[in-house]
């Protein structure tokens, strides 16, 4: 467990839920999300409902999936990068990722 008094465990749990969606799990029920993240069903439910209200996940029946709102996080990061510096670590990482396809 993190010892930093400024650490927000609830935020960390929410990010864990967001990170649990992937190609193999593009959509999950509440029970699946709880199992994959190791969180209780109650905690997973509160997190998923909050993420849905904020527009980061969408609910379709019993399943939750990432929504286009999640792109705000990625775009915020991209907007802070200096793309004119070709030797930046971000640029190199992007080039490595793009060349793998």
Image: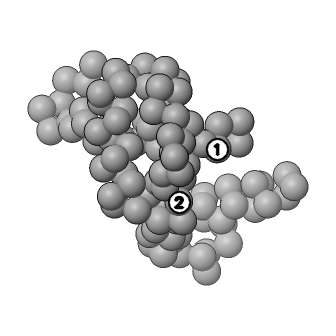
Q: Residue at coordinates 18% horizontally, 30% vertically from top-left?
A: 4
Horizontal side of 90 relative to 5 (left or right) equals right
Q: Nearer the viewer, residue 9 or 49?
A: 49
Q: Residue 59's spot in the image, x, y percent? A: 48, 51
Query: Which numbered disc, 1 or 2, marks the residue that appears first in the sequence?
Result: 1
Q: Residue at coordinates 71% horizontally, 42% vertically from top-left?
A: 23
Q: Which residue lies furthest to the front in this view?
A: 61
Horizontal side of 70 relative to 23 (left or right) equals left
Query: Badge 2, how many Cα within 10 Å: few under 14, some, many 20+?
Result: some
> SS for tag 1?
loop
Q: Residue furthest bottom?
A: 84
Q: Toward which corner of the image does residue 30 lie, by quadrant?
A: top left
Q: Nearer the viewer, residue 1 or 48?
A: 48
Q: Residue 6's spot in the image, x, y percent? A: 15, 38
Q: Which residue is disc 1 drawn over?
A: 26
Q: Residue at coordinates 44% horizontally, 57% vertically from top-left?
A: 56
Q: Which of 60 and 75 is in front in this view?
A: 60
Horizontal side of 60 relative to 12 (left or right) equals right
Q: In which quarter of the image is the N terminus?
A: top left
Question: Compared to 45, does 90 lie above or below?
Answer: below
Q: Which residue is disc 2 drawn over?
A: 67
């Amino acid at each position: 467990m993190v010892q930093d008094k400024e650490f927000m465990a609830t935020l960390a749990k929410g990010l864990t839920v967001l990170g649990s969606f992937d190609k193999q799990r593009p959509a999950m029920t509440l029970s699946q999300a709880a199992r994959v993240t190791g969180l209780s069903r109650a905690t997973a439910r509160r997190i998923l409902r909050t993420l849905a209200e904020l527009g980061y996940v969408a609910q379709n029946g019993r399943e939750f999936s990432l929504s286009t709102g999640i792109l705000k996080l990625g775009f915020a990061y991209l907007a802070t990068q200096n793309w004119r510096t070709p030797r930046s670590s971000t640029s190199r990482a992007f080039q490595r990722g793009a060349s793998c396809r």
